[in-house]
Amino acid sequence: MAIIFGTMHIVKKAGLEDPQYMVLIRSIYGIATALIIGFTYYLKNMVIRKNDTTALEYDDATPGNQGERVVTTNVKHDLAEIAKLQKSTLLTVGIVVFMHFKFGYIQPLILQTLLPLLNMYKNPLFQIHILGKPAADDLKRPWLPANPFAALGGGNANANASSESTDGAQAGASSGNDSASDSESSGSKKKETKEEKEETRKDK
């Protein structure tokens, strides 16, 4: 998020939204996108050459296939991940290009020039096959996608808990007020009873 807001600030500060920079930004975006797509094919060739046939078994956690046992190999797993990366890249390119030519947005071009490069560096495929890091800890296969609704669910739960505690406090305050009013009314009734008794004695 910091990168996104920082980039947006720089774009506005430097005046890159000016139409005179249109051709330059388009060119940079096109080059960056071509590099990403070309790099995925380079990774694919590397994975095929390594041909790591180590057995890999795990429980599928993707929606619709939860609980299914997957039996595969490292090479098949990595090739499937590369295919997903290529598909998501092309889908993003289609959306960004549509937004740019349909609505004239320049900012998505700039963001999608920087973010894919950063994401590629963080990708386990790059970390293992290019940087040579071991497939352990966070890089251990399978690279299952994180649940994007987990944090939201926790947030909602906290919100509900907060709401319930607030309601409880309000109920407690209301109950306290009712008790106070009841005690006041009972006290006034006792006073009235005493006064009536005194008046009765005076009459006698």
Image (cartoon, grey):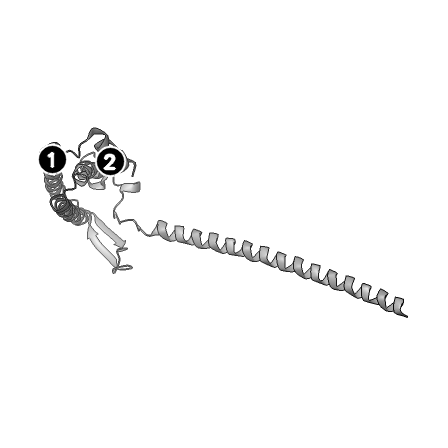
Classify the position of the N terminus by image quarter.
Answer: top left
The residue under the point 51% across, 53% down is 166
Question: For residue 136, which quarter of the picture?
Answer: top left
Vertical side of 200 occupied by 177: above or below: above
User: In this view of the protein, which residue sits in the foreground, 189 or 163?
Assistant: 189
User: In this view of the protein, which residue sits in the foreground, 20 or 60?
Assistant: 20
Residue lying at the far front of the rendered structure: 203
The residue under the point 51% across, 56% down is 167
Q: Secondary structure at mark 1?
A: helix
Mark on residue 6?
none
**Left or right, 146 with reference to 89:** right
**Residue type marked 1:** Met
Question: For residue 21, which quarter of the picture?
Answer: top left
The residue under the point 27% across, 53% down is 58
User: In this view of the protein, which residue sits in the foreground, 139 or 117?
Assistant: 117
**Residue type marked 2:** Met
Vertical side of 97 occupied by 64: above or below: below
Mark on residue 22?
1
Q: Which residue, given by chain and number where applicable, does mark 2 sit on?
A: 8
Residue 18 placement (x, y as % from top left):
15, 33
Classify the position of the C terminus by image quarter.
Answer: bottom right
Residue lying at the far right of the rendered structure: 204
Residue 72 placement (x, y as % from top left):
20, 53
Vertical side of 148 occupied by 33: above or below: above
